[in-house]
Amino acid sequence: MKMLTRAAALATVATLSLSTVFPTTSFARSTVGQGQYETLDFHVINANQQNISGARVICIDPDGKVLRSGITNKKGDWTCRIPLQPDPRFDEAREMGIITAMAVAKGYNESVVFEVPVVNQAQQPITMEPIRPNRRNEPTYALGNLHRHDILKMVDDYAKQLKLKKQPPVAGEQGYSAWGPDIQK
């Protein structure tokens, strides 16, 4: 709950203080990686899959600092370049960072997406719910668009570090067996 409260505060401050003359705004960063940047494409839509133009997308680094902010175009898209701060949890998968993205738009509740992957040409959808009278209106949240191969490699890496044993294969499953809780002897 504290994260959403802080996120809502950041959205309010960013929305009130950022000029709409310059739709993309860069902010100071507490820790910059090796100087490598990755391009992220955001697509903001409503629950009916309709594009939301004029939405502000706010990118927040793992330390809670605002990295970038910008406004979606007529197609609901906004593209930005984010400094890569590699996340060691994904070392075995590929060099990837993680940020939090937040979207605010007129007529919609705020939407927060956690664990957005920072990799080249990443595409992250953000779905927003309309504000409705006589209903509970509050921010929605989701997990980022992480690729299943990255998750598989991450799980394998940690299971191998702990020397866990694989479970027996499931009939009909080709080439995959889930890790179990037992440790190899």
Image (cartoon, rainbow, N blue to C red):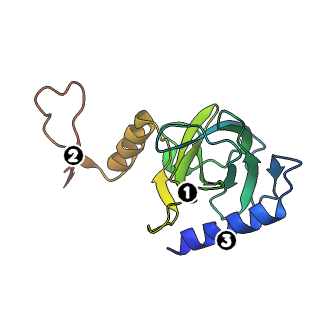
Mark 1 belongs to which amino acid? Val
For disc 3, the marked residue is: 9
Evaluate if marks 3 and 1 touch, with contact meaning CB atoms under 8 Å apart.
no
Q: Is residue 97 above or below residue 15?
A: above
**Which numbered disc, 1 or 2, marks the residue that appears first in the sequence?**
1
Judged by depth in the image, the label closer to the viewer, 2 or 3, is 3
Crowding at mark 1 (Cα within 10 Å: few <14, some 14-19, many 20+)? many
Give the Cα separation between the discs numbered 3 and 1. Answer: 13 Å
Q: Which residue is painted at 32% across and 48% down in the image? A: 159
Q: Earlier in the sequence, mark 2 or mark 3?
A: 3
Amino acid under disc 3? Ala
Q: Is residue 50 above or below residue 180?
A: above
Q: Which residue is mark 2?
A: 165
Residue in the picture at 71% in, 63% down: 65
Q: Nearer the viewer, residue 8 or 76?
A: 76
> Is 3 in front, or is 185?
3
Residue 57 percent location from the top left of the image: 68, 50
Local packing at callout 3 (Cα closer than 10 Å; few below 14, some 14-19, many 20+) is few
